[in-house]
Image (cartoon, helix red, strand yellow):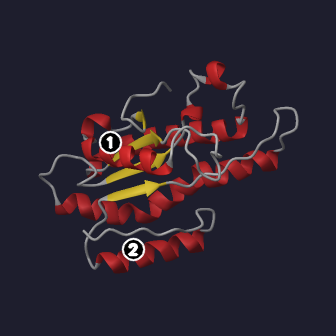
């Protein structure tokens, strides 16, 4: 399958439809083996000051966006799975990878909250984890796995220059992890090294 990378506004249904149409055309009748939902924004408000609009902005991009994108691309993922019925469920067959965050771990919140409160972001990414878990249950009957992966604290516009990870280190490691994913990882929450993270 040819490799395609396309950016779209995950909060805009028309943008999602256009992206799906473009990818469908590029695939030229083939299915899509791997969908990576990498949408993410963060805002910085205290728990005392945040508004409903702040929270909804986070959920729209970080949770609802990946849901809508996956719905749009589902027929292509299903087609890829059907094209390889005897292959083990994996990223080579058909998979959805939702890029989450270590900040989504409810269990780890007491250890990290004082350093990075980001409560709106944490809530939206925790919701993305639940979405992934639900996708894993629904899509497995179609031969598709769904996994959520935290890329680590990376030196991006969002992560800032003090982040310990360079983008190529995080992405390179995640790509190696993707190559190892099988049905046994369906619905799991992993970090960029492939280690299981606590919910």
| Of residues 79 and 125, the one drawn nearer to the viewer in this rendering | 125
| Of residues 122 and 157, the one drawn nearer to the viewer in this rendering | 157
How far from the left and from the top, in percent, is residue 70?
45, 58
Q: Could you tell me which residue is drawn at 60 percent across and 40 percent down?
A: 163
Residues marked 2 and 1 touching at CB (< 8 Å): no
Q: Quadrant of residue 109?
A: top right
User: Residue 35 shows which numbered tag?
Assistant: none
How far from the left and from the top, in percent, is residue 24?
36, 75
The residue sitting at the right extreme is: 49
Mark 2 is surrounded, within 10 Å at the Cα level, by few (under 14), some (14 to 19) or many (20 or more) other residues, namely some
Q: CA distance from mark 2 to mark 1?
A: 24 Å
| Of residues 143 and 100, the one drawn nearer to the viewer in this rendering | 100
Indicate left or right for 156 with 116 as reference: left
Q: Could you tell me which residue is drawn at 25 percent across and 39 percent down?
A: 183
Indicate left or right for 91 with 43 as reference: left
Q: Secondary structure at mark 1?
A: helix
How far from the left and from the top, in percent, is residue 161?
64, 46
Mark 1 is surrounded, within 10 Å at the Cα level, by few (under 14), some (14 to 19) or many (20 or more) other residues, namely some
* Residue 24 against residue 157 in the figure, above or below: below
According to the image, label 1 marks what residue? 177
Q: Could you tell me which residue is drawn at 55 percent across and 37 percent down?
A: 164
In primary-sequence order, the first of circles 2 and 1 is 2
Indicate left or right for 127 with 133 as reference: right
Q: Secondary structure at mark 2?
A: helix
How far from the left and from the top, in percent, is residue 94?
28, 55
Q: Is residue 138 visible?
A: no
Q: Could you tell me which residue is drawn at 51 percent across and 73 percent down?
A: 17
Q: Is residue 70 visible?
A: yes
According to the image, label 2 marks what residue? 23
Q: Nearer the viewer, mark 2 or mark 1?
A: 1
């Amino acid at each position: 399958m040819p490799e395609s990378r396309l950016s779209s506004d995950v909060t805009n249904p028309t943008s999602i439809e256009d992206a799906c149409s473009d990818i469908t055309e590029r695939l030229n009748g083939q299915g899509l083996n791997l969908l990576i939902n990498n949408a993410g924004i963060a805002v910085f408000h205290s728990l005392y000051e945040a508004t409903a609009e702040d929270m909804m902005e986070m959920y729209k991009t970080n949770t609802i966006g990946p849901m809508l994108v996956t719905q749009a691309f589902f027929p292509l993922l299903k087609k890829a799975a059907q094209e390889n019925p005897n292959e083990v469920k994996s990223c080579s067959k058909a998979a959805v990878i939702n890029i989450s965050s270590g900040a989504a771990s409810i269990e780890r919140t007491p250890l990290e909250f004082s350093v990075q409160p980001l409560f709106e972001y944490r809530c939206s990414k925790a919701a993305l984890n639940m979405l992934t878990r639900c996708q894993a249950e629904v899509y497995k009957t179609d031969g598709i796995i769904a996994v959520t992966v935290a890329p680590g604290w990376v030196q991006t516009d969002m992560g800032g220059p003090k982040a310990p990870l360079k983008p190529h280190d995080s992405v390179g490691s995640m790509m190696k992890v993707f190559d190892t994913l099988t049905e046994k990882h369906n619905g799991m929450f992993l970090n960029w090294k492939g280690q299981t993270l606590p919910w």
